Amino acid sequence: EQPWAAPEEEPIVRIDKVTKTFGSTYAVDEISLNIHRGEFFSLLGASGCGKTTLLRMLGGFETPTSGRIYIDGQDVTDVPPYLRPINMMFQSYALFPHMNVAQNIAFGLKQERMPSALIRERVAEVMALVQIEKLATRKPHQLSGGQRQRVALARALAKQPKILLLDEPLGALDKKLREHTQFELVNIQERLGITFIIVTHDQEEAMTMSSRIALMHDGRIEQVDAPRRMYEFPATRYAASFIGSVNLFNGHVMSHDNDMVLIHSEEAGSDLLVHHSQPLNPGMEVTVAIRPEKIAVRDHHSEDPNSIHGVIQEIAYLGDVSIYHVELPSGKRVQFTQSNVLALAEQPLTWGQEVALTWNAYSCGVLTQ
Ligand code: ATP
């Protein structure tokens, strides 16, 4: 499940019941979290959820109101930033305008009084790593946004930290360059084996790059999981809605046998059957979550569980797929997607058309919170 660390190994970062308040605001509310050696770990969440505050506490730029932070088994809660085996790449990149690229990268090493021959070697090494050798003598104002981002990354890596903290590292780049740089970052991280911890509000970015994601909400952790599990098995309604698109049907449990839950849902206008191993009591209010791409069109409506029908209200053609919005007799709106691979050969679905839809009991989930 987690190839990067045996569970008994000491995590490289252990966050133990950490809280940070600013006045009456709980920016971080009693968070506990382990991050393993060599992980590409993302703190993901909407603006104001506390992710930057948590990252800054790991770097030593904020002190927890309560709780402890351990790095490599050592309590660093009261250790200043420069004595932690950590480096941080700031969102603003914070390059010195009067220094050229090589000087910017060398700056931190000089401050540590590293011998100059070794500094030259290190600077050349990290410039090669992020492919900016040709820019060595340029000043920051002579660089593009993407190039500045590389310089900031090179500078952060030059000290060879055990852990690199990155605050929205791709925030200043346009969409094309972002996507390209995501793969580069993962590549560099894998080659160096350094633990990367990044903050992002972009779920696609977190999904693309991370070994694991902590989804944060109101200063707390909603779910920690690998991207695939986060998408396939969201733990809460919030997690299901934040990551990707989802249809949510409220209902109540009718029965639960052999890991199959039968749920009655007025909204869906159908009984819903869901594979779920944890016991659920009859009468319990639950929500069924089904992703748009797990829904299939069928020939005709049936009374079986997981059978809904409605009228197509909107179609968004995205090239590779189309998204259909369907209104059910209850007034509830449902989204489903269809691949356009076969669309030219088939009769396409149209506005106003009545459709019958279904899905598999193993393709959906039950949420209780
Ligand atoms: P964003 O993506 O917008 O940067 P975030 O998830 O990183 O948001 P934080 O910056 O950690 O969120 O802020 C969490 C909460 O703490 C917010 O309500 C914010 O207003 C508050 N906060 C953060 N720093 C301070 C501060 N220095 N003084 C007062 N309140 C603060």
Image (tube, helix red, strand yellow):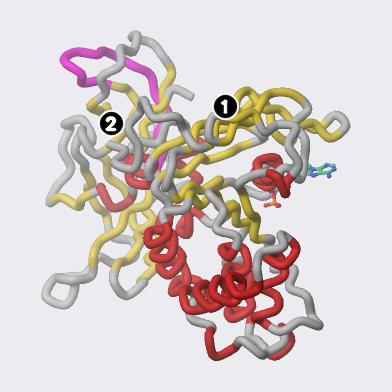
Q: CA distance from mark 1 to mark 2?
A: 40 Å
Prevailing secondary structure class for the magenta stretch in the rendered image: strand
Query: What residue does disc 2 label?
Result: 270
- Which element carries disc 1, helix, strand or loop? strand
Residue 314: % across, % down: 40, 62
Circle number at residue 32? 1
Q: Are marks 1 and 2 in contact (CB under 8 Å)?
A: no
Q: Earlier in the sequence, mark 1 or mark 2?
A: 1
* Image-based side of 142 in relation to 194, left or right: right
Q: From which residue to which does the magenta span run? A: 247-262
Please tell me in which quadrant of the rendered image residue 282 appears.
Answer: top left
Circle 1: residue type: Ser
Residue for point 36% across, 72% down: 318
Q: Secondary structure at mark 2?
A: strand
Marker count (numbered): 2
Mark 1 vs mark 2, foreground winner is 1
Where on the picture, by quarter, is residue 159?
Answer: bottom right
At 55% from the left and 58% from the top, the residue drawn is 160
Residue 42 position within the rendered picture, expressed as x and y whole percent measured from the top left:
51, 48
Percent across and percent down for residue 34 are 50, 32
Which residue lies at the image location 23% right of the left edge and 70% below the top edge?
Answer: 340
